[in-house]
Each structure stands twice: as C-alpha cells, then as structure tokens.
Image (spheres, coloured by chain):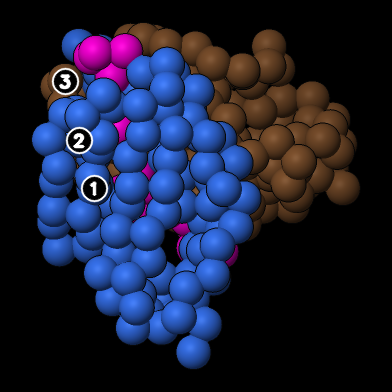
Chain colours: A brown, B blue
Amino acid sequence: DSGVTQTPKHLITATGQRVTLRCSPRSGDLSVYWYQQSLDQGLQFLIQYYNGEERAKGNILERFSAQQFPDLHSELNLSSLELGDSALYFCASSAGISGNTIYFGEGSWLTVV
Amino acid sequence: DAKTTQPTSMDCAEGRAANLPCNHSTISGNEYVYWYRQIHSQGPQYIIHGLKNNETNEMASLIITEDRKSSTLILPHATLRDTAVYYCIASLLYNAGNMLTFGGGTRLMVKP
C-alpha cells in the first residue's frame, strides 16, 4: 500500500459526459501528479500540483482539468468524454522536496461507452 | 529528461538473479536514474534510484556505470511475483519534486 488513495476504482460512463476522479496523497506530501495509461499510449504524464499550485503540465487535453485543494487532495475533471479517453488514471504524490520519491496510487479505471 | 533504452522483454528463472539493463547515453550530470515496476495494471511501484554511486535496498541493487551512460537493475533472487514491466527513467529533480517520463519498459517474465 503506497498510501495514495484514489476513488472511484472503476467508472463506466457515456460519451459526452463529465467525470471527476479524486486523489488523496500520502500524509504530508505536497506534490500531486496525474498520469494516464491507455493500451496504446503507455504511461503519460498529465499534470502536477504542488501545495495547491500548478507546477508542470504534460499532455493534458483542454477537456481535462485538475486542481489541488487546501487539504492537499486533488481532483481530475474529465469532460466531453470520448471513447479514446478510456484508460487507467493514476495519481501519485511526493513530499515535494527535491530528491523525494514519487508514490503511485492504484488507479481509477475509466471506461467510456 | 534523457531518453532511456531498455530491452522489450526478458525471461528469468525463479530463484536466479534478474539483471535488467538500461541505456541512457544522453543523461545529464544532474539527472537521476529511477526504476519503477508495474505489475499487471497496478500502480507503478518505486524500486530504487541513484545518481552516481551504486545503490542497494531491500528490493534490488542499482549499478550505474562510471560514465553514467548505462545502468543495471539487479533483483538478486527473482520470484514469480517479480513478473512485471520494469521502467528505467532518467529524471531531473525540481524544487517541487520531479515528473517521471515513462518509456516502454522491459517486460520481465520469471519462470518456475
């Protein structure tokens, strides 16, 4: 158990809908990362937040957005969903200090039908 | 982050050492070498990381060549539960942490 908690574990929704994935980082970790893993793309970095502020952006679509709240939990919002958005979405966290290890949650399986 | 190159797949006999190579010939002086593994769609699991010196922990050993252009992850006594995809990543560390760029990894199959 990495200490990173993600909900929901599984989600099935229709095209065009919007979903929110939630992540609770390890206790005390200030940085939160979101990754997407689809069958044909591998693990892709989406976005990083540090202590509530966006720090780095990867291949995140404009239909996707994220935020980190004052209690440090994070949400990834996916809107206007398409079939191709079906994937595993991982949240990860680290203390945020240079040299600290990143730990991953178990992921949220999103299926768009 | 520097590009890393790993074999697509490897086999290892149970109980033997598994040696997973990684090339990172363009690595910069301040990039660390990280190893993660992913067991069948579970979250990637941190194994070990290093900068210049060889490192060892309860899971594995990391051997980095003197010129830092390649490294080897060693699982000393592989078990069936070590069957996974192993990712070698070269990454800078930023003040607020670091982001990891995953490649294709090596699919290690441990066989009885």
Residue type of the residue flagged with mark 1: Leu
**CB under 8 Å between discs 2 and 3:** no
On-image quarter of the N terminus of chain A: bottom left
Residue located 66% across and 28% down the image: A78
In the figure, A21 relative to A52: above or below? below
Residue type of the residue flagged with mark 3: Ser
Residue located 13% across and 53% down the image: B56
| Any part of residue B25 in sight | yes
Magenta highlight range: B28-46
Q: Which residue is mark 1?
A: B62
**CB under 8 Å between discs 1 and 3:** no
Q: Secondary structure at mark 3?
A: loop
Q: Residues within 10 Å of mark 3 (few under 14, many from 20)?
A: some
The answer to whether tags 1 and 3 share a subunit is: no
**CB under 8 Å between discs 1 and 2:** yes
Q: Which residue is mark 2?
A: B50
Q: Secondary structure at mark 1?
A: strand
Q: Which residue is mark 3?
A: A98
Residue type of the residue flagged with mark 2: Gly
